[in-house]
Amino acid sequence: MLENDRTQAELPPAGTIQSLSGIDSEGWFEYLVRVYPHHTDYSGAVWHGTYVAWMEEARVESLRSLGIEYADWVAQGLELPVVELSLRYHRAVQMGQSVAVRTRMTAGEGVRLLWDYEIRSADGKELYVTAQVTLVGVDREKGKIIRQLPPLLKDALAKLAINP
């Protein structure tokens, strides 16, 4: 084991599923990641596209915490593509750091789902990125926006929705 490895905070293994109890009183679900070299640019700072990938992972894991397997919905013909994305970079995350990607669904308007994000230091003291993403339900076969979300998905997502 390298000396640096001993100084890093212990994180759950990649792919660890966090339960609904991991959602706090304000609706935030937290997903921990460690920054590896492939997440960074030539300077050792996290490449801007990596943040988007982490946000998607956190969103999928938050759904999994409710028993919603995204792959199952896709297999049934429903997709939830991103139709709008807004990010603000407050400061760069560096290789070797551990960060918490926090996400919560703030609203659902018909088939549009609005999600907020914060990427913070693992201890929550430093803010690196804030973002908002809008998803929309699409019938995969027809390639068209659906009129309403399937009841099972709508009910599960209602557990996540908050009023900011």
Image: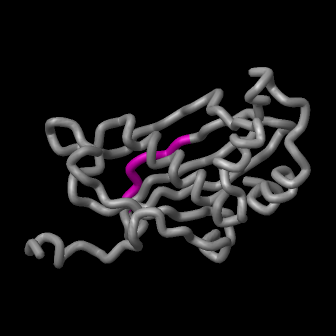
Q: Is residue 57 left or right of residue 109?
A: left
Identity of the residue drawn at 32% across and 63% down: 98
Residue 46 point in image, percent of width and height: 28, 44
Magenta stretch, main secondary structure, is: strand
Q: Nearer the viewer, residue 9 or 132?
A: 9
Question: What residue is at 75 percent from the left and 21 percent from the top?
Answer: 143
Question: Residue shown at 38%/44% (left/top)?
Answer: 90
Q: Position of residue 163 (x, y in %)?
A: 78, 54
Q: Does 85 sit above or below residue 75? A: above
Q: Position of residue 138 (x, y in %)?
A: 76, 30
What span is colored magenta in the figure? 126-131
Q: Is residue 114 magenta?
A: no
For residue 114, which quarter of the picture? top right
Q: In the image shown, does 60 or 41 lie closer to the viewer? A: 60
Please tell me how many numbered marks the rendered image carries: 0
Residue, x 61% and y 48% (percent of image)?
116
Q: Is residue 97 left or right of residue 28?
A: left
Direction top: furthest residue: 143
Residue 106 falls left or right of residue 28? right
Q: Quadrant of residue 84?
A: top right
Residue closest to the far left: 3
